[in-house]
Image (spheres, rainbow, N blue to C red):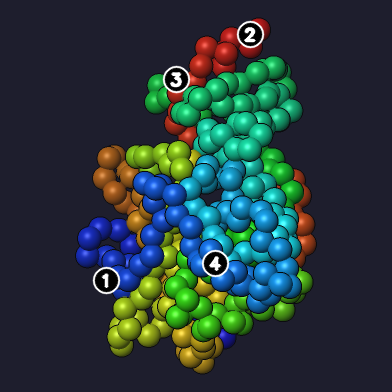
């Protein structure tokens, strides 16, 4: 069995910074359309405009993340619909943290209902808690002292492998044309039915951090990072995707590409984790430990009633403190 080493990396001289130095980045300064408008061929099913339609606006990442700027010309309507289904799981996977990200989607700010309260954002950075029934509420403990809320809620249902597919799809959109052919196995897996044969595949994880970063992301930012090809990076995957929106940051490694085919025979695979996804644990205001929240996404079974604990700091409106409002 392959040994898997997960290395949280912080600082300018960290392993991550040394190993992953090439990148493609999507930042919301202006609208971006990837691909060729005139010669339409779908990157995912391979059909051209004679064989399928390209009427819908294809988002590189979902609208619920606040994406109003990144689109592509290489995703046909049929594939667009299929990815929409995968993105439902990606949305549910973040559950209440979408609401706490205070990002306006197609249908306004996402609501989140619990046994004791309803939550919805009023504007970016402000959450309103309604119908608060303190007798029925043990999921939200607000700490007046540090202005943070400790949360322990039941998350909506999601299919883990769909979540992973929805994230990998974003990375595949960002790849340049000349490298895309190396990812034909990745595309084949993305477009086929979920399979339980990937249960022991160490790539099928997401590393995530919720809250805890100094900035929130009103619009998503995605960075696809390529490793430096040298002896020291031999045991690391070729590409990793770093994606942030609202209060959420994710990192994944892109599976099944030809550049990584040698990894199967290695005794060890190394996953360096970027600083934005690393939890820094302080004791007496001194950094004492680095942590990484790793969630397995190999399962094809729908996950229901999963509990999630987190601590978030944000502006609380009066509505929260006065349950009568
Ligand atoms: Zn297609």
Viewport quadrant of the N terminus? bottom right
Task: Name above or below for residue 187 compared with residue 169.
Answer: below
**Residue at which label 2 appears:** 325
Task: Name above or below for residue 43 compared with residue 71.
Answer: below
**Residue at which label 3 appears:** 144
CA distance separating discs 2 and 4: 55 Å
Disc 2 within 8 angstroms of ligand 1 (CB):
no
Badge 2 or badge 4: first in the primary sequence: 4
96 or 280, nearer to the observer: 96
Disc 4 within 8 angstroms of ligand 1 (CB):
no
Task: Name above or below for residue 193 compared with residue 129.
Answer: below
Badge 4 or badge 3: first in the primary sequence: 4
Determine whether label 3 and label 1 are within 8 Å by CB. no
Crowding at dot 3, Cα within 10 Å, few <14 / some 14-19 / many 20+, comes out as few
Badge 2 or badge 3: first in the primary sequence: 3
Q: Secondary structure at mark 2?
A: loop
CA distance separating discs 4 and 3: 57 Å
CA distance separating discs 1 and 2: 53 Å
- In front: label 1 or label 4: 4
User: Which label sits on residue 18?
Assistant: 1
Residue 78 in sight: yes
Q: Residue at x 35, y 39 (%)?
A: 214
Q: Residue furthest top?
A: 324
Q: Secondary structure at mark 4?
A: loop
**Residue at which label 4 appears:** 38
């Amino acid at each position: 069995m392959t040994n898997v080493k997960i290395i949280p990396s912080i600082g300018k001289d960290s392993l991550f910074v040394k190993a992953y130095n090439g990148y493609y980045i999507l930042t919301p300064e202006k609208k971006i359309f990837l691909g060729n408008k005139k010669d339409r061929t779908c990157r995912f099913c391979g059909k051209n405009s004679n064989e399928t339609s390209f009427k819908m606006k294809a988002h590189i990442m979902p609208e619920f993340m606040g994406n109003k700027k990144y689109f592509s010309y290489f995703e046909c309507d049929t594939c667009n619909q299929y990815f929409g289904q995968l993105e439902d799981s990606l949305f549910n996977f973040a559950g209440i943290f979408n609401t706490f990200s205070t990002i306006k989607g197609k249908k306004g700010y996402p609501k989140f209902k619990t046994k004791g309260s309803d939550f919805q954002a009023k504007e970016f950075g402000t959450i309103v808690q309604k119908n608060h029934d303190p007798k029925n509420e043990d999921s939200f403990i607000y700490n007046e002292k540090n202005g943070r809320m400790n949360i322990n809620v039941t998350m909506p249902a999601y299919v883990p492998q769909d979540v992973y597919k929805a994230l990998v799809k974003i990375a595949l959109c960002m790849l340049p044309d000349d490298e895309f052919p190396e990812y034909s196995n990745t595309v084949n897996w993305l477009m086929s039915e979920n399979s339980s044969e990937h249960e022991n595949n160490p790539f099928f994880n997401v590393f995530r951090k919720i809250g805890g970063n100094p900035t929130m992301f009103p619009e998503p930012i995605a960075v696809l990072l390529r490793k430096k090809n040298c002896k020291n990076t031999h045991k690391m995957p070729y590409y990793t995707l770093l994606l942030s929106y609202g209060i959420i940051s994710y990192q994944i490694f892109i599976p099944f590409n030809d550049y990584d085919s040698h990894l199967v025979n290695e005794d060890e695979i190394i996953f360096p984790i970027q600083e934005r996804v690393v939890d820094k644990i302080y004791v007496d205001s001194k950094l004492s430990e680095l942590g990484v929240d790793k969630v397995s996404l190999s399962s094809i079974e729908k996950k229901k009633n999963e509990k999630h604990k987190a601590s978030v700091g944000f502006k609380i409106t009066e509505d929260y403190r006065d349950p009568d409002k």
